[in-house]
Amino acid sequence: MTGLGALIKRNIKLYFSDKGMFFSSLITPVILLVLYGTFLKNVYDDSFRSALEAAGVSVSDKLINGCVGGQLVSSLLAVSCVTVAFCSNLLMIKDKTTGAKRDLTITPVKPGTLALGYYFSTIFSTLIISLTATGVCFGYLAVVGWYLSVGDVFALLLDVLLLTLFGTALSSCVNFFLSTDGQASAVGTLISAGYGFICGAYMPISSFTEGLRKVISLLPGTYGTSLLRNHAMQGVFDEMSSLGFPTEAVEAIRDGVDCNIYFFGNKVEQSEMYLVLIASVAVLIGLYIVMNVVAGRKKRR
């Protein structure tokens, strides 16, 4: 554990001393917040208003803003927890380009320990950015319309933690095969541009074709987004019910914003979403360690 602790401390210090890696990680949620607040807010707002007007229901602007705000916040956190992890994990690639990793592999440190050192230091670095973004999101909801309970707040924090673990494990497996800054930049751009679509953050999965919905339901990130949606918007749904909204109408809204996820026609419960996310993290971590151990054995031959 002493060797692992030293590696984690070394990686964290290098991450925060490299302003390029730190600010590239920090700017991701900032850009997303600006884009969501500038463009997607109006789209979501118009969508909710038109749906409610068509149903002949009149609600306050605060409730609309709280509903839209919850959707925006969950979208931002769903994307940033994963994309920031790819930025925070750039040290793994930088050590390859500078030769630092070669120096580390000739020491008595085991390959598995080295892999865990990168993983845990990336978790720590990513959590700082993700929790900062979460705090900003809470401030945003407090301004536009706060409907979160204490339980919802803690559930959101748990979701952020699990998605950070997932993003870190995924980025570790992907970055393992990268060896140049150009490759890292290309993969980072691809993940930043595409992940929001395949996890349902940019566009509700319910708006996709049936075939695409089935494919997306196989991806763990989909369930992370849905958990964030449920906990960011649960207070709004409770308020709708207390105002006399029909249960069918509330369920239709939950379906439309992906609070309800269906796996080949079967509704997935929140407990099952957590199991999928936790199992995915465990599998990815195991795969990452195995890849490092195998690579270490090949080098010794």
Image (cartoon, rainbow, N blue to C red):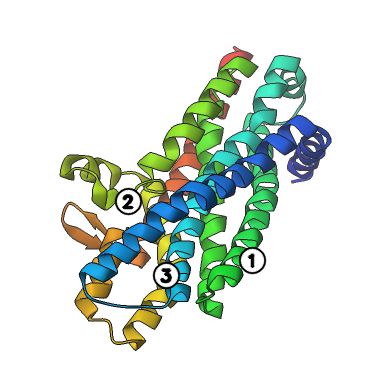
In the image, what residue occupies the spot 42% across and 75% down?
236
Mark 1–mark 2 CB contact (< 8 Å): no
Which labelled disc corresponds to residue 64? Answer: 3
Q: Amino acid at mark 3?
A: Ile
Mark 3–mark 1 CB contact (< 8 Å): no
Give the CA separation, mark 1 to mark 2: 24 Å
Q: Where does the image place residue 206, in percent across and percent down from the top left?
A: 25, 52
Relative to 43, say whether 237 is above or below. Answer: below
Disc nearer the start of the sequence (3/2): 3
Specify whether 30 is left or right of 192: right
- Say which quarter of the image contains residue 270: bottom left
> Crowding at label 2, few (<14), some or many (≥20) Cα neighbours within 10 Å?
some
Q: Amino acid at mark 1?
A: Gly
Mark closer to the observer (3, 2): 3
| Residue in front for this viewpoint, 101 or 49 | 49
- The residue indicated by pointer 1 is 139
Q: Where does the image place residue 171, in percent across and percent down from the top left?
A: 54, 35
Specify whether 144 is left or right of 58: right
| Residue in front for this viewpoint, 281 or 127 | 127
In the image, what residue occupies the spot 45% across and 50% down?
40
In the image, what residue occupies the spot 81% across and 37% down?
10
Q: Quadrant of the C terminus?
A: top right
> Crowding at label 3, few (<14), some or many (≥20) Cα neighbours within 10 Å?
many
- The residue indicated by pointer 2 is 204
Give the CA separation, mark 3 to mark 1: 17 Å
| Residue in front for this viewpoint, 181 or 96 | 181
Relative to 139, say whether 115 is above or below. Answer: above
